[in-house]
Image (spheres, rainbow, N blue to C red):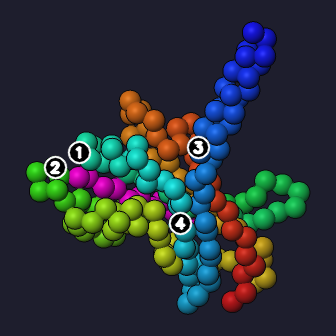
Amino acid sequence: MRRNKGRGACVAVLLLLLAADAAFAQTIHVAPLARDGHVLVTFRLSDAFNEDVRTAVHSGLTITFVYEVELKRSTTLWVDRTVAAASVTAGVRYDNLTRRYHVTRKEDGRIDRTETTESEEVVRNWLTDFDKLPLFRSDRLERNGEYYLRVRAHTTPRNASFVWPWQHADVVGLAKFTFIP
């Protein structure tokens, strides 16, 4: 009997570890590029468009992925200094009658692009892949200065009745770079 209890406890711990590993499988890959007076930001959120998000989208609920992007200056003795910050949002609403997705991207609250599509793959890329966004001007950066980009992501609404891909903690990605004009 004791042996079975021990195995049950081991199985329970293993299941908890697997669930925690799935929750932390999501990552944000970030790549900065300084060109033509801007810091161009490329980032990709992996494993975010899972079955729970897909179900929420198909229910007709508007789902928004919010990305807070910060350009920071590394310091040795004090808290790193935020040079600039921007917010990028990508939202989707599914119309059950027409079976089409309406997607919107905003940068700092201003609508950047909108589109209507029937392809779930287009929606997945629209919500999670961003390529060379000119979010920051580089004229405020010091030559040969050490900087990094921090991208933090979460979904809204956060108070849904189903499990989100990340519920209590935001997903964060970092990329360091040296500014060479």
Closer to the camera, 72 or 105?
105
Distance from Cα at disc 3 to Cα at disc 4: 17 Å
Q: What stretch is highlighted in magenta?
A: 84-94
- For badge 2, the amino acid type reads Asn
Question: How many numbered circles does the render carry?
Answer: 4
Q: Which of marks 3 and 1 is nearer the N terminus?
A: 3
The residue at which mark 4 appears reads as 44
Position of the N terminus by quadrant = top right
Q: Which residue lies furthest to the right in this view?
A: 77
The residue at which mark 3 appears reads as 23
State the mark number for residue 60: 1
Above or below, 5 against 128 in this view is above
Above or below, 16 against 34 in this view is above
The residue at which mark 2 appears reads as 96
- Contact flag, marks 3 and 2 (Cβ < 8 Å): no
Above or below, 34 against 109 in this view is below
Q: In this view, does 35 lie to the left or right of 123?
A: right
Measured from the top left, where is residue 181 in percent x and y?
69, 89
Closer to the camera, 62 or 37?
62
- For badge 3, the amino acid type reads Ala
